[in-house]
Each structure stands twice: as C-alpha cells, then as structure tokens.
Amino acid sequence: MPDQPLNPRDPLNPGAPIIPRDTWDCPPHNRWTFQHIREMTATAQIWRGTDPARALPSATQDLGAITFDVGGEKRSVAQFLDGSFTDGFLVLHKGKIVAEEYRNGMKPHGQHLAMSVTKSITGIVTGILAGRGVIDVDAPITDYLPELAVTGYKGATVQHILDMTSGVVFDESYTTPGSHMQKIGQACGWSVYERTDWPRTMWHLILSLDEREREHGALFKYRSIETDVLGFVLERVTATSLADLISRELWSPMGAAEDAYITVDDGGAALADGGLCATLLDYGRFAQLLLDGGARDGRQIVPAAWIEATRNGNGDLYQGIYRTVLPDGAYSNKFWIEDTSRRAMWARGVFGQSIYIDPDSDFAVVKLSTWPEHSSPDRSLELLAAMRAIRSALGAD
C-alpha cells in the first residue's frame, strides 16, 4: 500500500495542528514540510534567469515490474517506490525521461528540499568558477577568508574542504546533545534562537571550530560545515550571494524551467550544505548537464575536466563506516563516487534525497523522499540495488 500524504494545513480546519518550530524538519512533519520550506523558514530566491528552459523529451515506460535482490529478498521497483516514502522519482536515459512519478502530494511545479544534494550543487558552482580562474582550489582557505586563521581551518586548502579531508573537529551527530550538527539547526535559522551560548549564525559557528583531530588531507570524514565554509569562500571571491551565484552560473545556463530557492540564516547567508529546494525536473536537468559532460547546446557550462576530476576520487582516503554502503567508493568535490572503477557520481541527502549520475551509461536517477530516518544504510543499499536493476533493464550496463 503506498504511503499516504500528510497535509496538516487543512483549509477547513485553520490553526490546527501547529507544526513544532524546532522539529519541523523531522518525521512525521517532513512528509509535508519538505515541499513547503518557504512556509517554515527564511529563504532566498534562485532565479531561473532568461535562458530558455531545457526540454527533456519523454519516452516513459513502466519500470514497476523490474526486480532486484537486496538483503536476500527479491523486490520489485514498484514495491521499492511504495515502501520508501517516495515524493518524486525520475529516470533519465540517453537524454530522455524514462520514468517520472509524483507522490505524497508533490506536483511538477513544486519545489522539494534537497538536503545535502545542495553540497554537490555548490561543488559544481565551485568547479565553474575554478575553470575560469576565479578561484584556486589548491590555495589555502585563509587566502580567501583570512578570519579563519584562528580556527582549525588554518593550513587547509579549498580542495580539502571540497573533498571533506580537513582535520577539523566537527561532530556530525544529529542526536548527541550539543553536537555541532545540532548547533547548525539554530545557526542556519531552522530552529528558534533560544540557546544564547550557541552560535547564532553559520559564520559564527565556523569561527568557533578551533580544534583539529588530524592533519589536513589525511582522511575523508563527512563534515557538513565544510560546504558552508566553501559557500563563504565563493561569496567572498565573487562579491555575490550564493543564491545569485547558483542562478547566474548554473541554474539559468543549464535551462532550469522554474526558480529554485535556498534557506538563509539570520545573517542572510545561504545554507550551502543543505538548504536548496527545486523541482524534480530541474534536479533532472542538473543531472543531464553532467551526463552531457557539462555542456548544453554547444556551450560548456561546467568544465569537462572538473567532472572528470570529480569522478576520479581517491578511494584510499575513504575508509571506515563509509564503506558500509559504498565499499569501493570515494568522496570528491562534494559528490559520493559509487566505486572507483565505475566512477558514477552520487549526490545524497538525509531523509532519502538522491541524484545518481552515471555518465558512462548516459543514465541518471533522481529520487526525492521523506524517510522516517535521517540516514539508513539499508534504505541506501535498497536504492542502489533498484537503480542498478533499472540501469541493467534499460541495457545501460
């Protein structure tokens, strides 16, 4: 039985129920709020610009009967979609839409929170600017943000934060009381400013990170804050807000059909690590741009060399718990790399946000979800198995 949509805003019953201000981004509220972020927190527009929208031709087919094995069980794609809190699902192959599905009240024009898929989009904007010489990824971060010389980021390069290999101490736990990740909730503006002993903005949170646990560049460790540091670097070198940068450098030239938007903190800074909201098809246009080597209609938007470098992530730095889902994987330029031989790119966000991009097969999958868990290795493995089965059924292996 497909999961049912949650709609707490019943026009016939105004004022009830009230979504808690500090847990609106958590289950079960996320079933509704992830499609209504502008009604929950402050945002900045990402204008689609004046470039014509990119057409995505449709050649849809029924993929529901495709089966795959996961955890010793046989499952169909239909069962997978029904059981994984799906909001939107899109499959692209050879430049055409093979599947496009909306659930849980989502509409084609509706924007859905990307969570950490935002990191990958920020990484691509970095690649565009680096390709023009606007930013040097091998330069120390302090060349661009000298204020960080008093933090643990002293000595780290832009490439270190692109690959999340700085040695800065950052607790990514969502559940540990007082963790850095919990402090992000207040600093980014998603929760009420009540803890006056915690940083009020993302910039102040970054300035508070004064410890290192290892040498920069020694090992990958997932730290959401690294992408926020990157966002401030991009804004500093261009004197432009991140929202306007994404619009100018990526959203408009790639041919987005709709505006996107991104959450901002009390200081007006965009949440580069997880605040972007866009339509299913515009996430698909982003994927298609990368499938096409970063070019659209003969215009090179993302340097092909940047995409290639991203796909060539260093698996030796990718160790420990991260190998549970991707045992031969890597992390590079804000993308997870499925494995270092196939080199498919995977943008991932908590609660089941996903854009999988396999240039060698001209194949991509976008899945927008509202899982009841922040993260789930079992659900991630199921998603991978389903995508691989679809790819194989389309003859794309």
Image: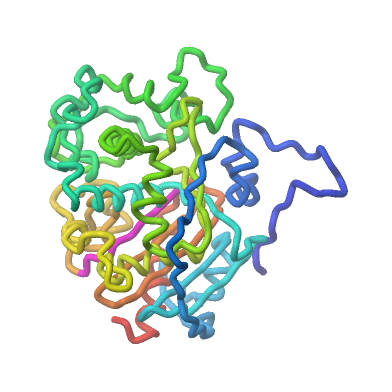
Q: What residue is rendered at 51% in x and 85% in y?
A: 61
Q: What residue is rendered at 45% in x and 26% in y?
A: 183
Vertical placement of residue 156 versus 248, above or below: above
- In the shown orientation, is residue 393 left or right of residue 308? right
Vertical placement of residue 128 versus 230, above or below: below
- In the shown orientation, is residue 105 left or right of residue 151? right
- In the shown orientation, is residue 49 left or right of residue 213? right
Is 46 inside the magenta-drawn segment?
no
- Residue 2 in the image: state x and y as whole percent: 65, 67
**Split into 4 quadrants, where in the image is the N terminus?**
bottom right
The image quadrant of residue 325 is bottom left
Q: What residue is rendered at 35% in x and 75% in y?
A: 363
- Residue 341 in the image: state x and y as whole percent: 17, 67
Identify the magenta region. Answer: 342-350
Task: Pick whichever, 282 or 5, lies toward us.
Answer: 282
Task: Pick whichever, 74 or 367, lies toward us.
Answer: 367
From this viewpoint, is residue 105 visible?
A: yes
Q: How is the image coloured?
A: rainbow
